[in-house]
Amino acid sequence: MNAFSRRGACPALSAPMQTGDGLLVRLNPVAGGLSPKLLIALAESAVRHGNGIMEVTARGSLQIRGLTAESAALLTAEVDALGIAVRTGVPVETGPLAGIDPREIADPRPMAERIRVAVEEAGLATRLGPKVAVIVDGGGQLTLDAVTADVRLAATRTDVGIQWRVSVAGDGRTARPLAVADEDAARDIAVAALRMVAEKGREAHTRDLSRRQLESLASWHSVAPPSVLPDISPSRGEIALLSLSSPILDVETEVLGAKLPISPLEGEMSGRTEGGAVERSRLPVGIFDVNNGHALGIGLPYGSMPADKIIGLVQKALALGTAEVRLAPGRALLFLGQPADAKQSLHDTAATLGFVTSPADPRTRIAACPGTPACASGRIATRDIAEAIAAENADILDFTLHVSGCAKGCAHPGPAALTIVGGENGAGLVVNATAKALPAGYRPGYDAARGISRVAAVIRSARFQGETAAACLTRLGPAGIAETYKQE
């Protein structure tokens, strides 16, 4: 295992990670998408060299599982031979419809590229940890609100035109706001924040920045030119606060500091699926308007599918005239370029193969990591449990249910209404917390789905008219829910 990237790192194509079913690699095409032929070829390579399982993560990365040291090298050579350029360095992510969404506020790609160049020129790629990430969100139909990042820039309309809202350490709901600025200042703030993180070491994130550093960043665009970027660090001094008010909150710095404590970013990835998904922006499943046509979003259940089924779906898409397939945060594929009359045929093929074809699919409400036997840390068969729950209790799933093989909580680092977590005592149930919390009750791992069915039955009988299942769970309370879950 020491020959490969350590757990908690990001398993890039050049640095595979050891998991329970062999090595895993993760790649992000520079172009954002692939032609159907290239995706088919990549899936065929996954079948030849891995265990035939492919995944699209919560952040929209493509993962290939079940590799060996020798086959990982062969896979890398085949990716190179196919001419698939993959991203390296600090991830600077844009949405899956970037540049083609008629509803987006601004095309985020130019800003993202400016940040990548600045990060590279500043030599930050080797100084930042593998999980440090930047999001540049242009808005539109598929935002990145549900994905966490160290730094996020979101396009926004203001009285002076389109500007960028800069925030740190969180998702679209929880990130701490710093400023609304023009594109030059927003880029400078983002790079300055990354420099501050780099000074704290490779384990650091923006959640570790001090109050004064955050205040410095919030006042950045009104006091500091780009030339001082190298001098911003805990060890070499910070920007003086020449302005005592935040450009976004318009409050005194004492209040700003109170509003800017940094909350935890995301849980460990452990080489399985990337963390960061929270509740709940629009799912990338269904039909989306794009420039000159439509895109059809098709989800992978729990982010995972056999490569041969992906090949079958993409072959159908190719026959129907699809020009490009993009990876979408939220564990989905977006098919672009097919004629309007081809959408139903592609949708039907996807449904037959077992893909997620509707945002109402109950599997979209369940986050499940690979579990046993795919992960060495897993204690329960998460996917089997998730499938049983989705089949039997779809009517009550108006909340997020998390099935985690262990307490790391890789598939859903944040709190969930209900979490089944594998441990030494079996399948524990955690209520309104993360997988790291102490379970309120246990039952055997093989019988976890039946425990949730008992909880579902109580919800059906106790729910008031018009009450959601989530509200009913809150009213019933953790102790009562746990007791129901444990009952034989």
Image (cartoon, grey):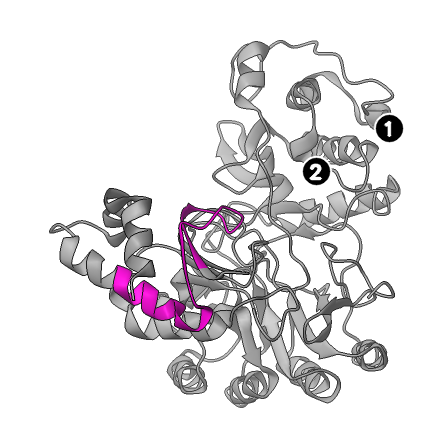
**On the rendered image, what quadrant is the C terminus found in?**
bottom left
Q: What secondary structure is marked by label 1?
A: helix
Picture coordinates of residue 333 (x, y %)?
Answer: 53, 71
Q: Which residue is mark 2?
A: 205
The vertical placement of 246 against 267, above or below, is above
73 or 162, nearer to the observer: 73
Q: Amino acid at mark 2?
A: His
Is 454 included in the stretch rendered in magenta? yes
- Residue at 43% x, 64% y is 288
Q: Which residues are magenta?
A: 428-455
Is 114 included in the stretch rendered in magenta? no
Which of the two labelled residues, at mark 2 and mark 1, occupies the earlier sequence position?
2
- Residue 112 is tagged as none
Picture coordinates of residue 14 (x, y %)?
Answer: 83, 66
**Are the residues at dot 2 and dot 1 in contact (C-beta closer than 8 Å)?**
no
Q: What secondary structure is marked by label 2?
A: loop
> Could you give the CA–CA distance between mark 2 and mark 1, rounded to whole angstroms?
18 Å
- Residue most toward the left? 465
**On the rendered image, what quadrant is the N terminus found in?**
bottom right
- Residue at 71% x, 49% y is 131
Picture coordinates of residue 22 (x, y %)?
Answer: 73, 75
The vertical placement of 212 against 349, above or below, is above
Snapshot quadrant of residue 162: top right
Q: Which residue is mark 1?
A: 230
